[in-house]
Image: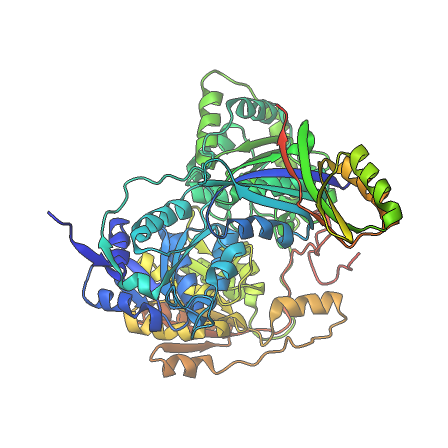
Amino acid sequence: MTKEMFTGAEIFLKSLEAQGVDEIFGYPGGVILNIYEALYNQDKIKHYLVRHEQAAIHAAEGYARVSGRPGVALVTSGPGATNTITGIANAYYDGYPLVVFTGQVSTDQIGNDAFQEADIVGITRSCCKHNYLVKDVKDLARVIKEAFYIATTGKPGPVVIDMPKDILTAKTTFDYPKEVKLVGYNPTYKGHPLQISKALKLLREAQRPVIISGGGVLQAGAHHELTKLAQLLEMPVAHTLMGKGTYPESSGQSLGMLGMHGNYWANFAVVHADVIFAVGTRFNDRITGCLKRFARDSQVIHVDIDPCSISKNVKVDIPIVGDAKNVLSAMIEELTSKPFTIDHVAKEKWLKQIDEWKQKRAIPECHSNKLSAVKVIETIYEYTKNFRPIVCTEVGQHQMWCAQMFKFDEPRRFITSGGLGTMGFGFPAAVGAAVADKNALVINIAGDGSIQMNIQELATCMDYGLKVINCVINNGYLGMVRQWQEKLFNKHYSQTKISAPDFVKLAEAYGAKGIRVEREEDIIPALKEAMESGCSVFIDFVVENFEMVYPWVLAGQPLNKVLLSNDQKVC
Amino acid sequence: MSTLHTLSILVTNESGVLSRVVDLFSGRGYNIESLTVAPTIDRNYSKITITTIATNEAVEQICKQLHRVIPVLKVSDLSVNDAIEREIVMVKIQVKDEDADKILRIAEVTGAKVIDITDKNYTLQIIADEKQIQALIELIKPYGYKDFVRSGKVAMSRS
């Protein structure tokens, strides 16, 4: 009996189905019309039409971050494909699994400067985990299988599949491979037992240990293991921006975020620690400050699934390559297999010392009678925390205030662009989050600059009845850059004063709800109204222009040079 | 301190792999001194040999990054091992009659071969390591040369 033949477009959909994908984000165009035709004739895969290809990728990433499953996006060739670059680079940097399908001109036209042709495999080479140009329809199913495998294993990341038009119309049989064979790709999951023993010995003997918990803990789903080990060994835990929610922030042992805008005490604990136990972090310059001064007097244990991260920035004494969940479980198992002792007196002294540092807090300063951004964000947190919100942010001052003020006891609830620092990420990511968890309260906290980068996604929200509450912290400036200009460039506010449309009217023009808040007593009623609204909302919080984010460790300074207020001089 | 490193990289033989490997160098601002690539006996794989001048730390990082590239199977930094290295050099010299004997003698002592002779030019070929190649270059310099090409190094470990 001859097997049934399918077109490449049909194989694309059948492969997604076999992969368990039921929701994708995309934007149609000339060379991928065959896929859109195939989509039209089925009801298993739901396609969300965005308003810009960049937003499709961010939405897919938001989806991946909340659901833990890979996000999928589909765009056309040429500009459709090049518009995805920022989104792909963002997911690559923060390590979230995406499979991005781009259309391509027919194989016989590739390289001939055809209409809407772009060498997307060449362009994305340095910003994705892997990419493919499919040159034979017989390879398509295998390539898709491999792409999902690569995207979701090891350190997750985006994989791009470029599909020429003639591949989508060519026919072949469909067999979705059961296994993936990639000789050159074998991520290490299990930590080396000897290294684990060495690390445990060091941690048991440590007098002033501190854990730095990063996004890798979240990715591996290792937050329970991390919490348990921290409790067993009585270690305080600082987290990176990406590691938010990997350790319950309501716990007394949590130091909150460290780094440039991290807590004073978290930075001091890291500076004075004798052992730093870093799990799933790349030691980005935003958390180490001056590299030469980082961990000068401490031993460093570093667990990471990506060997490239180890000893890249910070020289590591005990490296452990492996998956955080695997390694931490192995550590707990070895530790609890026999009775062990730790120096409670030393640990108590250490925690007491940290408690003393905890008295040093940034003092919010708002010099006018306008609303304080800090107050707004604090109130949003206090009012919404019992609803278990998913909080997305854009990039800038509001992002750091959110990271400081919002406290999470579980992962996958705080969605923010860390490594790449992409303005315009938050809103489309919130769209993806709302798709991934349809019952969740999804809030995007944005600046008046960032929100204007992907504001068009309000139309997507309205189309699909997705509800995102956009809280625009509107200070009339690109606040974070302005903050640097104030402190480091003699208040020369070069090109940072930025105008914005009337967000209330704009929301209404899209058919959404718009609310303006200018007084403190209106914050909660506005939030209440927004939560009761049946559609997406813009709340325009008109705040003080010149508020600053503190604590602040200036770029290149060591972590203990923490500025807590505007009065402190730069030294 | 920056030194010369020879990296031997086993990859799957498919389009785009060389770009992926080379991008890692250019993306980090390292210059490639020489580069060779050819299929292995099993034509599904290719061997890339790259020489570069960099610090040990930088090379260690490059090697880790290379391992990250999916079609890369194996990376060896041959500079830390005992390695056997060879390179082909061809040099075309315009020979005056009175110099002919001297050129032939240089070829003889350096182990080079005369592979082509026209009425004006001698072309020498040498298959050798860096030291011998440098010796040949020094010896022929006084006679001037019309063309000079080297293949880039191939290398393998002795063990």
Q: Quadrant of residue A272?
A: top right
Q: Which quadrant would residue A358 be assigned to in this image?
A: top right
User: Which residue is nearer to you in this view: A90 or B12?
Assistant: B12
Residue A135 image offset from top left, x and y in percent: 37, 56
For image coordinates 69% across by 50% down, the residue present is B31
> Which residue is found at the position 42% from the left and 62% from the top?
A57
Q: In the picture, which quadrant includes the C terminus of chain B?
A: top right
Residue located 15% across and 53% down the image: A4
Q: Position of residue A105 (x, y in %)?
A: 39, 68
Visible in this render: residue A316? Answer: yes
Q: Measured along the vertical axis of the image, is residue A213 above or below residue A7?
A: above
Q: How many marks?
A: 0
Name the residue furthest left: A1
Left or right position of B115 against A63: right
Q: Is residue A28 visible?
A: no
Q: Is residue A71 above or below residue A328?
A: below
Residue farthest along the top direction in this orientation: A338
Between A244 and A177, the residue placed more toward the observer is: A177
Decide: is A78 above or below B34: below
Task: Say left or right for A486 vs A510.
Answer: right
Colour setup of the view: rainbow
Residue A209 x %, y %? 61, 32
Of residues A481 and A425, the one nearer the viewer is: A425
Looking at the image, which is closer to me, A517 or A312? A312
Residue A355: x and y in percent read: 62, 41
State which quarter of the image contains the N terminus of chain B.
top right
